[in-house]
């Protein structure tokens, strides 16, 4: 990687740079407009995010975790055995309906089952 990529990645990850104005990093920021722009952008972003912090009310996390636990406990456990038991029953009902439909359509057409 080149120097700009390394420095920009460190800036993006929030790693501290050398504070001394004579350091290689600070000298590079003075010489490289692209890296200086990245540093300025992240500096503005950090300042904006720090200004947006709101205090979290006392007990907020405990209330959220308690609500999650209540909702998790309120859900019935999955019952895969019920699905496995009902699948053949539904298949038999469907097959019976198809057979009844086919036979009720064919018998009158063949003249079978009608009154003499």
Image (cartoon, rainbow, N blue to C red):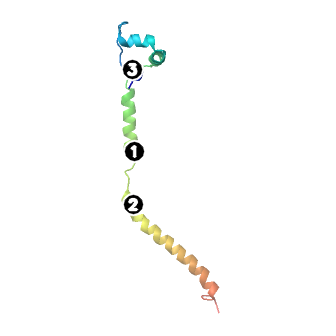
Q: Is residue 102 visible?
A: yes
Question: Please, what secondary structure does the residue beneath circle 1 have?
Answer: helix
Percent from the top left, x then y, of residue 95? 50, 73
Q: Residues within 10 Å of mark 3 (few under 14, many from 20)?
A: few
Question: Please, what secondary structure does the residue beneath circle 3 have?
Answer: helix
Q: Earlier in the sequence, mark 1 or mark 2?
A: 1
Nearest to viewer (mark 1 / mark 2) = 2
Q: Which of marks 3 and 2 is nearer the N terminus?
A: 3
Q: How crowded is mark 1: few (under 14 residues within 10 Å), some or many (20 or more)?
A: few
Q: In this view, does 47 lie to the left or right of 98?
A: left
Residue shown at 39% from the left, 50% from the top: 76
Q: Mark 3 points at which residue?
A: 3
Q: Mark 2 points at which residue?
A: 82
Q: Name the residue under label 1.
A: 74
- Image height of 107 relative to 76, above or below: below
Question: Which label number is shown at residue 115?
Answer: none
- Image height of 58 relative to 114, above or below: above
Q: Tell me the distance, in whole angstroms, between the alpha carbons under discs 3 and 2.
A: 63 Å
């Amino acid at each position: 990687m080149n120097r700009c990529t390394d420095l920009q990645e460190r800036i993006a990850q929030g790693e501290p740079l050398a504070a001394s104005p004579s350091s290689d990093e600070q000298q590079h920021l003075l010489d490289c407009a692209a890296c200086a722009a990245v540093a300025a952008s992240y500096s503005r972003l950090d300042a904006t995010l720090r200004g947006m912090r709101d205090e979290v009310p006392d007990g907020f996390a405990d209330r959220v975790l308690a609500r999650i636990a209540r909702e998790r406990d309120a859900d019935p456990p999955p019952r895969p055995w019920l699905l496995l038991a009902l699948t053949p029953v539904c298949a038999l009902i469907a097959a019976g309906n198809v057979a009844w439909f086919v036979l009720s359509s064919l018998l009158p057409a063949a003249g079978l089952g009608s009154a003499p």
